[in-house]
Image (cartoon, rainbow, N blue to C red):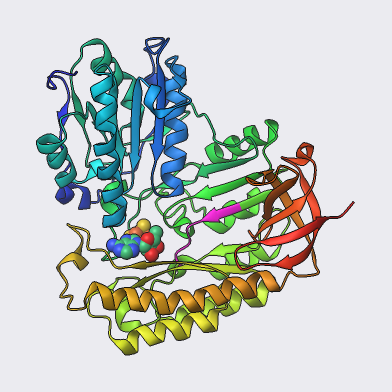
């Protein structure tokens, strides 16, 4: 449908994305940009979101912008006038899924040449992805990245009204944009970004290139957002950042840390506060001690370890040792005895030996993880680890993953077993898919519980006695 771009054509560069400037990040009010209204009237949209909570939070902003332009959400993908894929670049299979979906959507475009198809999120931040779209996927009309969501009204105006193709991806992050409209997925649980970007440069990871320099939001903006959520009846917020423990490190005018933020949020009238993701190197004892005060701070910590071998951790540029990690875990259990810990682990990192892999298994046993996301290393172009010598076959790596997952699954089971016979607090999310007299929700320790109950309990926190521990969830009985 669209002609070739005339107004917007900016491609990203991984080389530029690697640069870090020491200048302070400015904060801009979205309303300064937002002038165009109404041209979405009568048109519908659908967004498909891939990847992490950061992308889910971005999708809520994109929906907010679209609905401010008078678009409405389409029930079905095939009826939408605008389809956006909000993509993830973390591993190759995540990218392949998106390319597969773009192939599948071609037929919708054939049926409806007026359909606008857009790609946004982390994948467009990669030069090679944009080049591939330019060469091979002509049915994509709109490409933008993670740093310019706020310009979506302009882009859509160009694509819809001028019928021009838009490709604009900035390598540099730019300012923090406050007050973007949002349509949240849930009316009870909310994502609240406390910072954007990442400065860690773990050697395997593409995120510092796709999400830019680390920028912390002003704490007053965070607190204001949470207070507004409380007024709307929200019960739970999850603070988001690639490394929440380094929150505030970029402030030049004040000292204000993640533990300071948690302490302040602990005084607010919101029932539950969670956060993700933590970096072991920056998870300090003050934070552990603040979490020990409990109140609305949930006893659940996702603490990616990645490997149990010091040599591998060094090659990954994780900047902590196995011993540092074990000490942190010991402190967490000492101050928060009831805590549930989960982690992320990569197997088959280039050069990982049998012994080094065994060290990971050993660490997993020692830490009593109650869950883990486990991955086979995936080489990401532009990251240092993509150039490391890697002789191991994918088959061998998958065997390691299988072995690791067996131990991880035992951890899940131990993690639910320990609640059998206990009374837990559950924030009720909804009705079970298979049986609408069964409702379900998550405990403070982030365990899923199914139990008999009335739909009217959705959105409230109730007490439930755990009667049976399964591996991935628990079954309970409402305490009346
Ligand atoms: N290959 C495999 N796993 C990766 N992760 C990040 N980059 C890669 C990669 N190149 C994993 C890490 C991280 C999680 C979000 O994804 O474990 O914590
Ligand atoms: Fe990637 Fe490491 Fe940053 Fe996490 S801390 S986003 S693994 S570079």
Q: Is residue 163 magenta?
A: no
In the depicted view, which residue is nearer to us: 152 or 138? 138
- Relative to 13, is 348 on the left or the right? right
Q: Is residue 200 visible?
A: no
User: Does the magenta-highlighted stretch encompass residue 277?
Assistant: yes
Seen in the picture, residue 20 relative to 66 is either above or below; the reply is below
Q: In the rendered structure, which segment of residues is drawn in magenta?
A: 274-279
Q: Nearer the viewer, residue 264 or 228?
A: 228
Q: Quadrant of the N terminus?
A: top left
Q: Residue at x 53, y 84 (%)?
A: 366
Residue 3 in view here:
yes
Q: In the displayed structure, does residue 54 sit left or right of residue 269?
A: left
Residue 188 position by quadrant? top right
Going 21% across and 11% down the picture, which residue do you hit? Answer: 162
> Where does residue 53 sit, x and y in percent of width and height?
46, 47
x 57%, y 58%: residue: 259
Task: Return the residue nearer the eye: 452 or 255.
Answer: 452
Q: Position of residue 298 (x, y in %)?
A: 66, 58
State ligand 1's quadrant: bottom left
Q: Residue 421: x, y in percent? A: 81, 69
Whole-percent x, y for residue 30 in the image: 41, 25
């Amino acid at each position: 449908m669209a002609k070739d771009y005339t107004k917007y054509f900016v491609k990203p560069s991984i080389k530029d994305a690697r640069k870090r400037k020491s200048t302070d990040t400015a904060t801009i009010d979205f309303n300064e940009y937002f002038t165009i209204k109404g041209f979405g009237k009568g048109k519908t949209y659908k967004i498909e979101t891939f990847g992490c909570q950061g992308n889910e939070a971005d999708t809520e902003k994109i929906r907010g912008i679209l609905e401010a332009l008078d678009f409405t959400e389409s029930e079905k993908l095939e009826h939408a006038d605008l389809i956006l894929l909000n993509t993830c670049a973390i591993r190759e299979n995540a990218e392949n899924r998106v390319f597969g979906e773009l192939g599948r959507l071609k037929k919708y475009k054939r049926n409806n040449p007026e359909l606008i198809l857009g790609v946004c999120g982390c994948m467009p931040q990669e030069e090679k992805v944009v080049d591939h779209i330019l060469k091979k996927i002509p049915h994509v009309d709109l490409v933008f990245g993670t740093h310019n969501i706020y310009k979506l009204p302009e882009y859509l105006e160009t694509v819809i009204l001028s019928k021009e193709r838009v490709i604009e991806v900035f390598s540099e992050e730019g300012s923090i944009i406050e007050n973007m409209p949002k349509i949240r997925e849930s009316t009870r649980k909310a994502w609240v970004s406390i910072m954007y970007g990442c400065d860690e440069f773990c050697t395997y990871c593409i995120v510092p290139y796709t999400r830019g320099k680390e920028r912390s939001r002003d704490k007053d903006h965070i607190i204001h957002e949470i207070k507004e959520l409380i007024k709307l009846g929200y019960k739970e917020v999850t603070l988001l950042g690639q490394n929440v423990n380094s929150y505030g490190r970029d402030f030049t005018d004040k000292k204000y840390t993640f533990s300071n933020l948690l302490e302040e949020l602990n005084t607010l009238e919101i029932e539950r506060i969670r956060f993700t993701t933590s970096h072991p190197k920056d998870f300090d004892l003050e934070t552990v001690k603040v979490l020990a005060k409990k109140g609305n701070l949930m006893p659940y910590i996702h603490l990616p370890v990645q490997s149990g071998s010091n040599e591998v951790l060094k090659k990954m540029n994780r900047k902590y040792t196995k011993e540092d990690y074990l000490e942190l875990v010991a402190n967490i259990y000492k101050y928060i005895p009831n805590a549930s810990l989960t982690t992320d682990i990569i197997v088959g990192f280039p050069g990982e030996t049998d012994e080094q892999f065994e060290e990971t298994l050993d660490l997993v046993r020692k830490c009593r993880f109650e869950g883990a996301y486990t991955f086979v290393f995936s080489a990401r172009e532009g990251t240092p680890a993509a150039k490391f010598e890697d002789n191991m076959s994918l088959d061998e790596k998958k065997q390691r993953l299988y072995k690791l997952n067996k131990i991880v699954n035992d951890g899940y089971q131990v993690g639910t077993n320990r609640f059998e016979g206990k009374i837990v607090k559950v924030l009720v999310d909804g009705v079970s898919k298979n049986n609408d007299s069964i409702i379900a929700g998550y405990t403070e320790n982030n365990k899923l519980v199914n139990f008999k109950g009335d739909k009217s309990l959705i959105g409230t926190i109730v007490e439930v006695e755990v009667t049976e521990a399964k591996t991935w969830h628990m079954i309970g009985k409402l305490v009346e």
